Amino acid sequence: MAAHSNLHAHNGQAGKVPIAGTPDSGLKDAAGENPSGPVAQWLEPTAHNGLVAGSSPAGPTTLRPDGATRGAATRSIIDLGQAVSGIARRVTTDWMRICGTFTVSKASIILITRDIKAQTQHRKRNTIMADRLKGKVALISGGATGMGGASSKLFASEGAKVAIVDVNMEAAQATAAEITRAGGVAIALKADVSKADEVNAAVAATHKAFGPINILFNHAGTIVIKPFLETTEEEWDWLHDVNVKSMFLMTKAVIPHMLAAGGGSIVCTSSISAVLATPNEVLYDTTKGAVHMFARAIAVEFRDRNIRCNAVCPGFIQTPHGNREVKELAALGVDVSDAAIAAQQGRMGYPEDVARAALYLASDDAEFVTGQQLFVDNGFSAV
Ligand SMILES: NC(=O)c1ccc[n+]([C@@H]2O[C@H](COP(=O)([O-])OP(=O)(O)OC[C@H]3O[C@@H](n4cnc5c(N)ncnc54)[C@H](O)[C@@H]3O)[C@@H](O)[C@H]2O)c1
């Protein structure tokens, strides 16, 4: 992920609040607060449009500025309404005061609200299973954590046997164990995807365990964030090895199995960074541009042999990679504040947002879709 030209380099981080939905966002405490004091009060507009607290809900009839007389029942309802709205305003004001050292911008509040709604919706969606990958074997590189981890779990819940290939064996084993506990089938295999012998061994082990591989999700990858003039030749070669050569090695090792099995589907993780540049990410952006074209070219060369290949292009996603990227860009003065991300893509994405898109591309639902880039960024790249 990354940002495009709308995320400018700057020096200040004013306006930054904790990422929405985090335990320290403050929203939960404020909303759950019991405003016992304000219940006995009501708020009345004054001539200068300010709000002042009255002392008793029973009193306002004779004190109203418009001097109107109303029936007792109507008056009670109106007073109750005013009391409730007064409490709501007071709670909001108190919450903003409680936030103290933080400057809570309107955009941040919108971001928090959208985040809560989106979390509820996506939790519901994740409980739906439809066996869309029943009988398939999927190899997911970088399948231990983040979007790869979410994809490992989703693909398994849709019936695939999943080989998680990752350099982080501890996390890969934990994800495989979680899948197994949930009734799915998964194995964890250790490999550095930039090394040919390790990739070949992982592909052979997958084939031995599960049979021919039908789905390859080339997800493993990482990032170097540095001013261009400080980027070293070693870093350049290393990141291209991990992000791009890895796709060459893995795809070259898997395609013969797919051909023998009559076809398959390949998904490659690109990024909005393939088409939208960010300061301090020349190296990273270049690797993602290469992934874009890799997926297209494979699609064209293998279309008539029943192998599809597409790229999935996430925006800013809440993963170890995404969180580190935000932190390091901010340290270099790039505006990746909550407000900036809210303006570009509404909220931070969840790993599951991308897993569902990868599932679509991997499954037979996308049988007539190849050589495409599917942006999962809530419109970031469309603006
Ligand atoms: N998070 C984002 O905002 C974002 C946005 C766009 C694209 N991406 C892409 O997603 C990938 C990062 O994944 P994530 O965001 O799910 O974060 P992540 O860091 O949680 O996952 C990356 C996984 O890849 C594994 N990995 C890294 N290098 C490896 C190697 N050499 N060999 C084998 N496994 C390796 C890691 O151990 C990890 O499990 C990168 O390709 C990145 O370009 C991320």
Image (cartoon, rainbow, N blue to C red):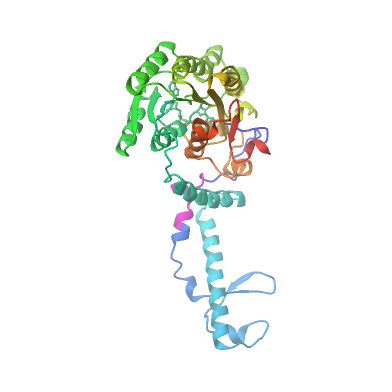
State the image coordinates of residue 155 (x, y, percent, origin top left). 42, 34
Residue visible at 61% across and 26% down in the picture: 274
Please give left or right for residue 43 compared with residue 134 in the image: right
* 73 part of magenta stretch: no
State the image coordinates of residue 232 (x, y, percent, origin top left). 56, 14
* 27 part of magenta stretch: yes
> Considering the image in quadrants, where does the C terminus appear?
top right
Between 43 and 213, the one lying in front of the other is: 213
Question: Eyeballing the image, is 55 above or below 16?
Answer: below
Question: Eyeballing the image, is 68 above or below 214?
Answer: below
Query: Residue 198 sits in which quadrant?
Result: top left
Residue visible at 55% across and 15% down in the picture: 236
Please give left or right for residue 129 compared with residue 313 in the image: left
Residue 318 shows up from this direction: no
State the image coordinates of residue 87 (x, y, percent, origin top left). 52, 68
Residue 233 shows up from this direction: yes
Residue visible at 46% across and 67% down in the picture: 35
Between 293 and 22, the one lying in front of the other is: 293
Question: Eyeballing the image, is 381 above or below 98?
Answer: above
Q: Which region of the structure is painted magenta?
A: 19-29
Query: Residue 165 sits in which quadrant?
Result: top left
State the image coordinates of residue 51 (x, y, percent, origin top left). 61, 70
> Considering the image in quadrants, where does the N terminus appear?
top right
Count of marks, rendered view: 0
Between 255 and 357, the one lying in front of the other is: 255
